[in-house]
Amino acid sequence: MTISTTEKIGQAVIVFLLLLLCVSVIYPFLYMLAISLNDGADAAKGGVYLWPRQFTWINYEIVLGNEVIRHSYLITIARTIVGTFLGLLVTLAAAFGLSYRMLPLRKAILTYVLITMLFNGGLVPYYIQLYNLGLVNTFWVYIIPNMFSVWNMFVMLKFIQGIPDAVVESAELDGANPVRILFQIIVPLSKPMLAALGLFTAVFHWNDWFAGAFYVTDQSLIPVQTFLQQMLNASDLSVIFGSNTNQEALARGAQAKNVTLMSIKMAVVMVSALPILCVYPFLQKYFVKGVLIGSVKG
Amino acid sequence: MGRLIKYRWQYLLILPAVVLLFLFNYIPMAGIQIAFRDFRIGQSIWTSPWVGFENFSFLHDDQFWIIVRNTLYISVLKFIFGFPAPILLALMINELRHSGFKRFVQSVSYLPHFFSWIVVAYILQSFLTLDGGLVNDLIVKMGGEPIFFLGSEEWFRPMVVSSALWKEVGWNSILYLAAITTIDPQLYEAARVEGAGKLAQIRHITIPGIMPTITIVLILNIPSLIAAGMDQIYPLMNPANMQVADVLDTYVLRSGLQQGYFGMATAVGLISSVIALLLVVMTNQLSRKLTGEGLW
């Protein structure tokens, strides 16, 4: 079979366009990295595109020496771990319970769950409820309202229904109660699905800035993303310098004088983005699997 | 009763989810009555005085209609660009012959999905800032005047639409790519024997093959026509672009959570919830007609 010239041109155009897309994704991170590793005042003159012109670690020293940032990092890590674990646990338990087709009231419960996908009270009644429950301004406002995900529940339900009934029945004959069956049989069989949904839940917790910005006023409870959001429109460096513990870095006056808001911002955003950039290549296939588990109509 | 006891463990497993939905979904639904009451924080939503439609007076406010227009403008633009783009991308990726490069393009294009909108806002800021930002740097070098993109009304919509496209196009192409792999390769073989070129194959085999997926995605996207994407817009909004950037969700956020007009903000939220519900119901009808199957 011969390939015609037009097809070769077509192929070349496609490769070119897709390369362009890849560059548009990767380049912003290289650019921000270069700015964050460059002397601030110098970068503001422009012209730093790919490589730092006046290399310095000062931006990172200041950022990593900041008590508020370090603390917000701990909050993000804590809520990601606790939130993902409890989120999977509560949602999986419900999905498993509802996977018993003979369960009395099953239809009614499923309808009760589905209605929440169609209609909601809106932001203000939700906030008032958080307030009335005493969750506002606590760490648990990140966790408890997000413990059950309707969407994930339906994905899990479909997955569990794919497990042969015989597996569960034989365990029942051995006298195991459903809670034991859940942990000893369903969980091991659902590992790939749990990995995929767990990753999505973790990404949600890692990236959520909204709860920290509106349901929490105590600065010691904000996660990294909310810190970034507050800093996005900051007009000076007081956010950063106000609570700095790395006096050594600040003392090097000559260098610190050249630190600009933009160079610090780029260092902060790189610090928040690096973990995702680092784990992404290894976990990517689980994410893709996750989308497909959820989407296959069946 | 005996059956309920027989299934006690199952109910125990479901109970936390039922309680959570009650606390965080159903009670807020009952809280909608705040839209018709004079509510202050700390009071009960059940006992504050009724005020009828007083909280709906924003309907006579021109500013509200500007916000409605902004919301529809942004969500419709996002739909027009955001809906076909992943299909095109999937078709292009599918044409790649080198499987290593294909995997690379896929991995890279999915990546932005995993960053928050805050990170996206930082990227925009770093490129578009007036002090040393790449774009203005290049504009000046080519002899132009620097543009204050971040505080400009005319650049706000292009900025929002293109960054949304950048963030989600790859991720949204996954479903189409999966659908393409289920097409029978013999169909292409037969078409080649018949002398059909690449474009003819795409038009007559690939696109019909992924049509069911296209329909489902289209249907699922219709309800989002009332949501402009607060997560994305809020970080980019500032006093300079407010007149085009303010959408229903940011309005609710500002008037309710920040300024304490709970009644009015709930009323605005109620209107957008009702429109969203209507869109979902209409979508379901449409889906029944098109695919013979409803969403529920």
Image (cartoon, helix red, strand yellow):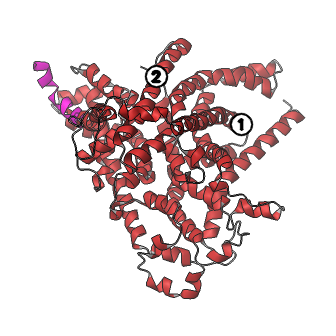
The residue to which callout 2 is attached is B278
What amino acid type should be assigned to the residue bearing mark 2?
A: Leu
Residue ID at (10%, 19%): B2
Residue ID at (63%, 42%): B161
**Labels 2 and 1: the sequence-earlier one:** 1
Residue ID at (51%, 49%): B234
Q: Of helix, strand and loop, which mostly describes the magenta segment?
A: helix
Q: Is residue B42 above or below residue A172?
A: below
Chain identity of mark 1 = B
Element type at mark 2: helix
Front in this rendered view, residue A292 or A251: A251
Element type at mark 1: helix
* Rendered location of residue B264, percent (x, y): 38, 38
Residue B115 in view here = no
Image quarter for residue A46? Answer: bottom right
Residue ID at (53%, 40%): B63
* Rendered location of residue B168, percent (x, y): 58, 42
Residue A212 in view here = yes
* Distance in Å between CA atoms under marks 2 and 1: 36 Å
Using the image, tell me which numbered label, if any, was put on residue B92. Answer: 1
